[in-house]
Amino acid sequence: MPLTDTPAAPTAFTRDPLWWRSAVIYQVYVRSFADSDGDGTGDLRGVRSRLGYLQELGVDALWFNPWYPSPLADGGYDVADYRGIHPAFGTLADAEELIAEAAARGIRTIIDVVPNHVSSEHRWFREALAAGPGSPERERFWFHPGKGPNGDEMPTNWVSNFQGDTWTRTTNPDGTPGEWYLHLFAPEQPDLNWNHPEVRAEHEDILRFWFDRGVAGVRIDSAGLLIKDPALPEVPAEPGPGEHPTEDRDEVHEVYRAWRRVADSYEGTRVLVGEVWVPDASRFAAYLRPDEMHTAFNFDFMTRPWRADELRASIDLMLAAHAPVGAPSTWVLSNHDVTRPVTRYGRDDSGFAFAKKRFGTPTDLELGTRRARAAALLAAALPGSLYVYQGDELGLPEVELPREVLEDPMHFRSGGVDPGRDGCRVPLPWRGTATPFGFSPDGVRPVASAAPAAPWLPQPAEWAALTVQAQEADPGSMLWLYRQALRIRKRERSLGDGPMTWMPSEPGVLAFSRGDDVVCVTNLGEEPIALPEHDRILLSSAPLVGGLLAHDSTAWLHRTA
Ligand code: NOJ
Ligand code: MG
């Protein structure tokens, strides 16, 4: 029988080409998700063993933080080999099996690519150091002679995103002081020169390498920083649009147009998701023009304090910015870089700013948890895609870790003032009443003679109450709230991508409708409020009190069209 007329059966990729516009994407910080071999470090087999949990949670895709070979000077954002897997996490075969098993459960895989910089252990950087000044190997980076008579002053005074200097001096092969190289982050993360054709070709090839292995998209690290002004000027006091020497330069868009052509050459929709920290909303949205990225993280919403006027202004700002380019917004409450929501929202200053992180900030975790529940339903009801950082579905707080276990360069480069980002990266609690709470298997030793290794960051004893096992048994838990919310979000066609309309409400309240039949109301005020007309309550973040929605809570309502 001739089969030529039979349309190809839809594959996991060709099914639902617009999946990314409404998707719920769960962020897996591999090192802290689940450890299969008892070495205290999460790994890919650990993730595979928990795919059932992720499916039950109801997520559409997983975004993995960098899983490549790396000295972990910045938690893996210092990549030594973009085509491999960190040996502590597993092998390339493990990654391929994980991608395939997740796909079989209807879950797509997004990986992290880090184009702005490489690890100082990357082959290119070692070759550049060895080859010396003036060599073609150095042209892939930003090597530059120092200023001053002896060349011992930095080429510029640009300040690092991790605080401190952005240039480090090298030593020549003969031992004399040599050129300086640029690193917008830590010295172990030398910046690539994106004017170099080999840098561009290499990254397009890395995309193909992973798309060929079935990944459905890439999260692009530090996406606005790739292009530098080759004249190396100082940062102007008030840079106009595109005038900053290292941020959001107009030429960067050509890089993503080229990446989009690569992504579009694959079946299904392979998405580009940008990490774009650009404060101007229209400059931000320019990355989402139809021939560039599909989406980018909406950080504006995440950094706002828990106040109705602030959140409403952010929602309006971001929806208005996205509209002209036709891209959906994303909604993000946290990630591996920021203070956990239950902690943030339990503080006097409930906004987020890197520069303001301090040890010992007073926190009301009960209030923070109540608000984080309300925020979760608010974010999940807004139009577009939703990101969930691992552990937020358990309501884990930020952990104030003892200084001696901290690893984050942000802590060290602040002179010890900033606690850094390790406090949101503590290994997850799965079950039981004592650490490692099922993160590592009971009694498994990495080497036959060794004791089971402790989790790479210590888990607080109080997490016994926050394990998956404990929460599964408690319908009032954060985990139940997330499971129900994601189930309803999938079922109610008005949620996810699509229009929203503000409804009249009193000050301190956010109320909007999605389609004809779903309404979301968040009460950020102090007094209980009456709910708008509805025929049933789909879900609420806190029990209603006498039919009223109490302070710091969200309800999803159904109304007859
Ligand atoms: C953003 C990542 O999210 C963060 O963890 C990392 O330190 C920097 N980019 C540098 O790669
Ligand atoms: Mg392990």
Image (spheres, rainbow, N blue to C red):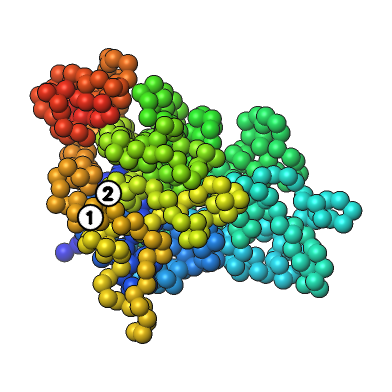
At horizontal 66% and vertical 37% (from top left) the residue drawn is: 244
Image quarter (top left, top right, bottom left or bottom right) of the N terminus: bottom left
* Residue 207 in sight from this viewpoint: no
**Disc 1: which residue:** 468
The vertical placement of 193 against 121, above or below, is above
Q: Residue at x 50, y 30 (%)?
A: 281
- Which structural element holds mark 2? helix
Instruction: Please tell me which residue lies in front, 72 or 503.
Output: 72
Counting from the top left corner in percent of width and height, residue 359 is at: 48, 46
Label 2 CA crowd tier, 10 Å (few <14, some 14–19, many 20+) = many
**Tag 1 near tag 2, CB within 8 Å:** yes
Mark linked to residue 165: none
For label 1, count other residues whose C-alpha is less than 10 Å away and answer few (under 14), some (14-19) or many (20+): many
Residue 197 position, x and y percent, is 64, 56
| Ligand 2 is within 8 Å of the C-beta of the residue at disc 2 | no
Q: Is residue 554 left or right of residue 27?
A: left
Q: Residue 175: x percent and y percent?
A: 80, 71
Q: Quadrant of residue 178?
A: bottom right
Q: What's the distance in space between the residues labelled 1 and 2, CA to CA?
A: 7 Å
Label 1 is placed on what type of residue? Val
| Residue tagged 2 | 394
